[in-house]
Every structure is written in structure tokens, then in C-alpha cells.
Amino acid sequence: MESSRQAGIDPAETTLVARSREVPDVSFRAFLVGRGAPRVRWAAPDGLEVVGAGEAIRLTSDGAERFQTVRDAAETAFAGATMPDGAARPRFFGGAAFHDDHEPEPPWEGFPPAAFVLPRIQLVRTDEATHLTVTRVDGDTDALEAELETIADEIGQLPAMRPVGGQPGVVASRRTTTEAAWAAGIESAVERIEAGDLRKVVLAVALAVTLEEAVDISDALERLRRSYPDCFRFLIQPTDEAGFFGVPPERLVHLDGDHARTDALAGTVARGDTPEEDAALADSLLESEKLQHEQALVAETIEERLAPMGEVTVAEQGVRKLATVQHLHTPIEADLDGDPHVLDLVDALHPTPAVGGLPPETAERVIRETETFERGWYAAPVGWFDADGDGEFAVGIRSAVAGGRRATLFAGNGIVADSDPADEWEEVSLKFEPILAALEREE
Ligand SMILES: C=C(O[C@H]1C=CC=C(C(=O)O)[C@@H]1O)C(=O)O
């Protein structure tokens, strides 16, 4: 395989022009329903919400240099562009596969090792307003103005709210790994840890689900918004056949100018049925040597990877409570030197030991040898960047790839010296729960 490759940009052929205008605050789901793939959707806990449809530019790459390749191609595309700034500015949306040599086979058709799209139409909702941005690559500003008018009119006809459809319903679900194979994989990883050639590895399971009806991912995301309001929500849908979506609680990185924010999130216990039980579980999380070790490796690694780039501040550890689980959480910030691009940070941080392991190369080998399914874009960076190199990426966990009547869900656990296969088998159920609940019909 080539070490890296790019597509979609011929500087001689590309004059990027974009215009924006404020539009009424319409239902983003209603907007997406009327547009076929490619489509993207992004919502961050800080309130930024974006939907995009169509492709002005699509950048793809693979290999060890994949993020640099995309960064260079995007810089070429943005050079000389005429476009709005502020909330309405055009952004590339997309992400990458966990492994840089990933082959996009089912269920991952349409998902190369890295792919980013600058949508033709972008709608951005902030606390203040909703902005429509239309982008062209042929420099034709007259056509652009006309298009902006037409699309703004179409958006003006959309409803402000759209009722959420029912869940598609689950007919059958099957883990792609047997419990025996899972236990053998964990025992072998623990042996390597005891032998000293591995410190931690995150091993995952896929859940293949057959649905009663075709899934409407926008509706599933809306249900997830209600249960997970402080998580990220994303949809990357390159074709009408398959979309990758999820509600990750974990920020890989947010970059604004030279200030970066990231999360070290690892270690899991369930939520309690009563406030007392919940608090006792949180205490057990804070007091567990195993879980503290599992998360400390993540926090230390992030700090080490950011340290050469600027001044790092590690905040106090806390407990992050989600609807079905609680995690150990350490917010980390950095003031970076030079003129950083968020893709440089993505490159430096992915995979953190919250989804990969330590040492990274050994962990990656163990993941490839042990897992019985293709990770695809699961547990990998997903997010956006702009012309200044600012942007935000989540870690693509609590996620699924779905299309028609099929969905594949993913969940993984950090394995350290005292991991118990039966406990870990139970724990993945808690991590499947968010997406499964958005697909299953209520009793
Ligand atoms: C890899 C996943 O979660 C990571 C993030 C938080 C807690 C984790 C854990 O307890 O093992 C994982 O490191 C997943 O949800 O698939």
C-alpha cells in the first residue's frame, strides 16, 4: 500500500467561494431528511450544532501520514478562498479509521483510513443564531448568490420541529466474539502484561444487530440527545447505505488558537439504582487500584504527548456520570507553541490508551491478533477543522455503523494485570446500552 495518498484537490481547478446568511431556526433533522448522502451531523456539549449535506471537497488519505496529508490538501483548498468567518465559516467534517491501513469492507464501505468533507451546504446553530453557508469550488460567485437564495428559501419552508419517529426495533443481536474467545483473548493479554511486554490494551467486541425496520439515524441521534445531553453526537454518512454515528463522552481534542483541551477518560462502573448505591459505586471507582491504574496510564500518556508541544495543565480527577456508566475523568489543557493545527494534535494523541494501549505498537499488535471484527472508524478520531486549523475531535466510542436493517455496535474495555474476563464481558454490555436503547422498541 502507498504510505499516503490524497484525492479531491487540484489547485489549478479549485477556487473556493462560500457565502452565508442567517436563516430561521429550523429542525436539522427535517433538513437532513430532504437531502441524500453525503451528510454529516455534529453536536458538541458546549452547544455548537452543525449539519452538512453534499460535498464541495472530499479529502481522503491513508498510511502513517494520513492526517498530515489531509492538512496539506485542506490548506491548498483554503488558500485564496473567499468565505465568511465566525460561526458560519466553512469546516471540513470527518474522521479516520482506528488503524491507518484499514480496508473499507462491509460494514465499513465508504469509510477509508481518513476522509473529510467540506459540505456544499452547512447549517450551524449557536446560542445566538442559525447560519446557512453554501460553498462552491468553481469560483462562480453569481451562481453562488443564486444558490444561497434558493437554498435559504427551501430552508425557510422547513418546520421548526419534527416529531421523532419510533425506534426501528431489534429482531436479533449477536456478539461477534464468543465468551470463550473473549476470555482467551483477555487471559493472553494478561499473561503479556505479567511478562512485562505490555502495560495495558483495550480489547473490544462488536454486536451485530438485525433491525425490524430500516434505521433512521437522525431519529436515533435525537433520542440519544435526550439521554446523553452532555456527550458529543455525530453522524458521518458517506453513502445512503451506511452511516457511522454515536454519542461519545470523550473529547480527543478541542483547539482554539493555541489553547487545547482534552480528556483522559477511563475506568468504568455502573450507575446505581438509588442515590446511595450510585455514590457507593462512584467511591468504588475512585478507590479501585485497578481502575485508577487503567486511567492514570491514559492521563500520563496524554500529558507526555502534549508536553513537547507547549505548557500542559492537568486538572483534578473527578467522576464523569453518564446514563448507564460512570468513568474516572481528568480534564487536561495545554497552551501550545507555534501555530498548531488540530490535525497535528489528533495525530499526536490517537490512539490514547483509553482505546489503544501501552506500549502503543505492542497494544496495536495485540488488538489485531485478538479482535474478531474490523474496528473501522470505531474508537478513532471524528470531528471537524477549519481554515485556521482550529477544530474539535471526539473519540468515536459508544458508536455504531448502520444502514437499512443492520447495525453494528462496538464497545471495548481497558485490560490491565488484574482484569477478570467475566467482569469485562459484563462491562461491554453497559457500553452497548446507549446505542442499543436508541434502536430497541420500548416494551
Ligand atoms: C473503549 C471504550 O471506552 C473507553 C473509555 C472509557 C472507559 C473505558 C474503560 O473503562 O475501559 C474505555 O477505555 C468504549 O466505550 O468502547
Image (cartoon, rainbow, N blue to C red):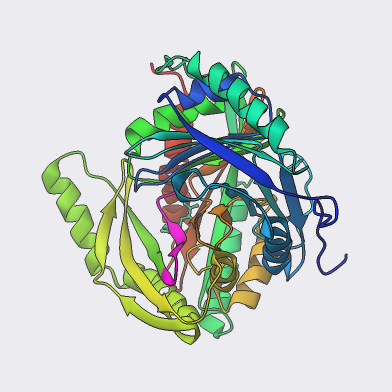
Q: Nearer the viewer, residue 105 or 344?
A: 344
Quadrant of residue 78 within the rendered picture: bottom right
User: In terms of depth relative to the viewer, which is nearer, 242 or 126?
Assistant: 126
Count of marks, rendered view: 0
Residue at 16% in and 54% down:
280
Residue drawn at point x = 45 percent, y = 67 percent: 257
Measured from the top left, where is residue 77 in percent x and y? Answer: 72, 56
Asked whether 137 falls inside the magenta stretch, the response is: no
Q: Is residue 252 magenta?
A: yes
Residue stretch in magenta: 247-259
Asked whether residue 439 appears in the rendered view, the answer is: no
- Which corner quadrant holds the C terminus? top left
**In this picture, residue 275 sits left or right of residue 293:** left
Q: Is residue 252 above or below residue 405?
A: below
Figure check: 135 above or below 315: above
- Residue 422 horizontal side relative to residue 323, left or right: right
Q: Quadrant of residue 209?
A: top right
The residue lying toward the viewer, choosing from 374 and 157, is 157
Q: Position of residue 356 (x, y in %)?
A: 56, 66
Location of residue 236 in the rendering, given as x and y in whole percent from the top left corner: 61, 40
Residue occupying the far left of the picture: 276
| Position of 400 relative to 287 (above/below) | above
Pick the quarter of the image with the N terminus: bottom right
Image coords of residue 53 (percent x, y): 63, 33
In the image, farthest residue toward the right: 1
Q: Is residue 166 visible?
A: yes
Q: Nearer the viewer, residue 271 or 235?
A: 235
Establish if 284 lies above or below 213. Answer: below
- Which quadrant does ligand 1 occupy? bottom left
